[in-house]
Amino acid sequence: MQGGELVIRLPGRSRSPPATTLRYEEVHHFLFLSCREQPIYSTRAHVFHIDPATKKNWVPTSKHAVTVSYFYDSTRNVYRIISLDGTKAIINSTITPNMTFTKTSQKFGQWADSRANTVYGLGFSSEHHLMKFAEKFAEFKEAARLAKEKSQEKMELTSTPSQESAPGDIQPPLTPESINGTDDERATPDASPTSEPRTEPLQNALSLSHSSAINKHWEAELEALKSNNAKLTAALLESTANVKQWKQQLAAYQEEAERLHKRVTELECMSGQTNVIKSHKTELNHTIEELESTLKAKEEEMERLKDEVENANELQTQRDSIAQKLQETEMRNQDLESQLQEVETRLESSQLQQEAFRKNLRTLLEILDGKIFELTELRDSLAKLAECS
């Protein structure tokens, strides 16, 4: 008992979960629920809710893995998913045939609850637990669908008599006059020999018998409900009496626990330690050694990753320098190509100039040859003239 609260363990929890703290006024409610609602499957998972503002991000509702259970309410024939974190109910979702459990990864699944106007997410420790939870979800979803169909069939069956006896077809109640006829009718039985026999009394009798059958059916239903209510009331009273007894036992247990705690403290202060403490210390030392070896392995792995990161940075620097040199080389190549094009253009122009010079030189040589030939002829003619004179 802590600050006006009672520590109890909810029934059906597996793997010895921690005790759930409830107030006195909540004890009666949970004891009443335990009479009609029992867990049929339990597992442990991290619980998340979708962020109502963004509708995208997940918001954790528990700091550690909590127990998530399927409950079945035999009275209402309803399946629910419930999870408690201390005294806070972080999941209270009724399974309907329209729900779908979606596996978004190997260890995470989610489903939407339109009644709670939210989306629940569960993170499991292994894929096996996720698959098992998904199988149970599909199984209980199918059971909820069948239960809904059966309830609809029952409602249709119970509504059929009321549809048959519509307000327009209600007959007047039976009276001695309607069965035996009035005094005038009894006095003149042969007044209309050609008229058909009266069917009104027969219809009234059938309607009365049908109404009495319906009344008997509803009376039986009412008696069954009264009987169930009496049983539940008796169970609640018995639970209330048990709560008082549990309170006394809890107070005695707490006193005994305090006494044992003091005794353990005294024994720990003593110089001679017991074998249990020694074994516990040995286990702790072994655990510390394992943790130290694990830590050392992690540190070595971190060093290796740091070296890889440094090597990657060096490679990145070399890659950047090589890329810069390559860019400079390409720029030089472009300059050389432009210079080569200019040289080729100059070479072509010089070749053209040489060809023109050669043509001019040939022309001059031809002219010079003609002049020389003319001079030769003139010399010959002058020599002949000189000989003749």
Image (cartoon, rainbow, N blue to C red):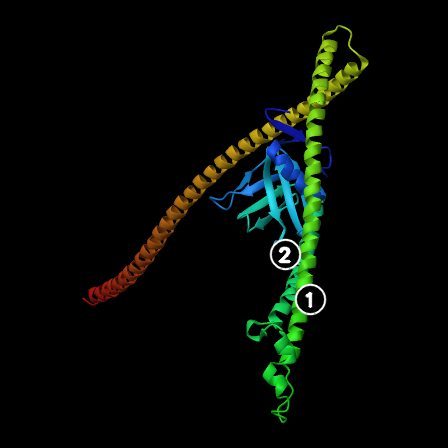
Crowding around mark 1 (Cα neighbors within 10 Å: few <14, some 14 to 19, many 20+) is few
Q: Quadrant of the N terminus?
A: top right
Q: Is residue 328 left or right of residue 219?
A: left
Residue 146 x %, y %? 69, 59
In this rendered view, identify the residue nearer to me: 258 or 18: 258
* One can see residue 146 in this view: no
Vertically, is 72 above or below 328?
Answer: below
Of residue 384 and residue 64, the one placed in the foreground of this image is 64
What residue does disc 1 label?
213
Residue type at numbered disc 2: Pro
From this viewpoint, is residue 294 visible?
A: yes
Chain-order first, disc 2 or disc 1: 2
- Identify the residue at horizontal 62%, vertical 37% (top origin): 84
SS at circle 2: loop
Residue 98, horizontal then vertical, whole percent: 60, 56
Q: Residue furthest bottom?
A: 194
Viewer-nearest residue: 219 or 360: 219
* Mark 2 neighbour class, 10 Å CA radius: few under 14, some 14 to 19, many 20 or more: some
Q: Tell me residue 137's x, y (percent).
A: 67, 50
Residue, disc 2: 97
Looking at the rendered structure, the kind of residue marked 1 is Ala
